[in-house]
């Protein structure tokens, strides 16, 4: 595998498509086991999670599951409040349901923390978080993803849905920003 360049930055191969695919199959098995007798609703967080959610949902073939999609919209806050996120597009009734949130990455945890709080207000039976990637050392919120593809160091990565300013989501493998030497 070759290096790739975006916006003058060089990225090197980090996790291959084969490794990603195998890991998602394992996560699917875990979810199938934990959701026996349940009818979970997968909630794919757009944009980044779409390849992961697609593969994970299909890895749960045989489970009576549904999938829906939401988008988190970011706004520049005023003063020190920073970024505010708003959930767009969730119309399903979550009352009493098992919800499996599918994220591309949990970094500081701000996004998923905010989302979990919004979903809780809709009275689901339980909310589980599945994330392809997790940066545990960057976490500043009390969240613990239930299904983690790969725990990685606090470095910038792209590919398999993860972007750099909207680009690189269609890379089939995951790449990591190359350190200057
Ligand atoms: P949070 O810090 O956990 O709220 O993550 C916010 C969002 O930052 C994620 O959903 C991703 O869209 C983005 N993000 C975090 N780390 C990376 C990365 O390494 N590459 C690309 N996007 C990232
Ligand atoms: Mg995301």
Image (cartoon, rainbow, N blue to C red):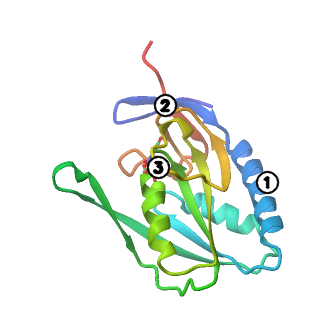
- Which callout, 1 or 3, points at the residue further toward the start of the chain? 1
Tell me the quadrant of the picture where the C terminus can be found: top left
Mark 2 lies on residue? 11
Tell me the quadrant of the picture where the N terminus can be found: top right
Query: Element under label 3?
Result: loop
Identify the residue at image location x=50%, y=66%.
Answer: 116
Identify the residue at image location x=55%, y=32%.
Answer: 153
Is residue 149 placed above or below 135 in the rendered structure? below
Q: Say few, some or many: other residues with alpha carbon within 10 Å of mark 1 (under 14 / 14 to 19 / 20 or more).
A: some
Closer to the camera: disc 1 or disc 2? Answer: 1
Mark 1 lies on residue? 26
**Residue behind label 3 places its C-beta within 8 angstroms of ligand 1:** yes
Is residue 168 placed above or below 71 in the rendered structure? above
The quadrant holding residue 118 is bottom left
Is residue 165 placed above or below 84 in the rendered structure? above
**Furthest-top residue in this view:** 181
Mark 3 lies on residue? 141
Query: Element under label 2?
Result: strand
- Tell me if label 3 and label 2 are in contact, CB under 8 Å: no
Identify the residue at image location x=67%, y=48%.
Answer: 149
Closer to the camera: disc 3 or disc 2? Answer: 3
**Residue behind label 2 places its C-beta within 8 angstroms of ligand 1:** no
Structural distance between the alpha carbons of marks 1 and 3: 27 Å
- Which callout, 1 or 2, points at the residue further toward the start of the chain? 2
- Which callout, 3 or 2, points at the residue further toward the start of the chain? 2
Is 158 left, or right, of 96 in this rendering? left
- Tell me if label 1 and label 3 are in contact, CB under 8 Å: no
Identify the residue at image location x=83%, y=74%.
Answer: 36
Q: Say few, some or many: other residues with alpha carbon within 10 Å of mark 2 (under 14 / 14 to 19 / 20 or more).
A: many
- Tell me if label 1 and label 2 are in contact, CB under 8 Å: no
The image position of residue 3, as x and y in percent, is 53, 29
The quadrant holding residue 12 is top right
């Amino acid at each position: 595998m070759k290096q790739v360049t975006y916006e003058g930055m060089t990225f090197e191969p980090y996790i291959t498509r084969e490794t990603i695919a195998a890991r998602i199959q394992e996560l699917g098995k875990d979810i199938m086991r934990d959701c026996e007798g349940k009818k979970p609703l997968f909630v794919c967080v757009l944009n980044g999670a779409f390849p992961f959610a697609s593969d994970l949902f299909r890895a749960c073939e045989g489970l009576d599951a549904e999938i829906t999609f939401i988008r988190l919209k970011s706004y520049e806050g005023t003063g020190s409040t920073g970024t505010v996120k708003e959930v767009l597009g969730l119309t399903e009734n979550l009352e009493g349901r098992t919800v499996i949130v599918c994220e591309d990455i949990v970094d500081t945890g701000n996004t998923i923390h905010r989302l979990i709080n919004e979903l809780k207000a809709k009275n689901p039976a339980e909310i589980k978080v599945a994330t392809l990637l997790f940066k545990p050392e960057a976490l500043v919120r009390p969240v613990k993803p239930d299904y983690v593809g790969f725990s990685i160091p606090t470095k910038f990565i792209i590919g398999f849905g993860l972007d750099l300013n909207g680009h690189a989501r269609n890379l089939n493998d995951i790449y990591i920003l190359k350190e200057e030497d």
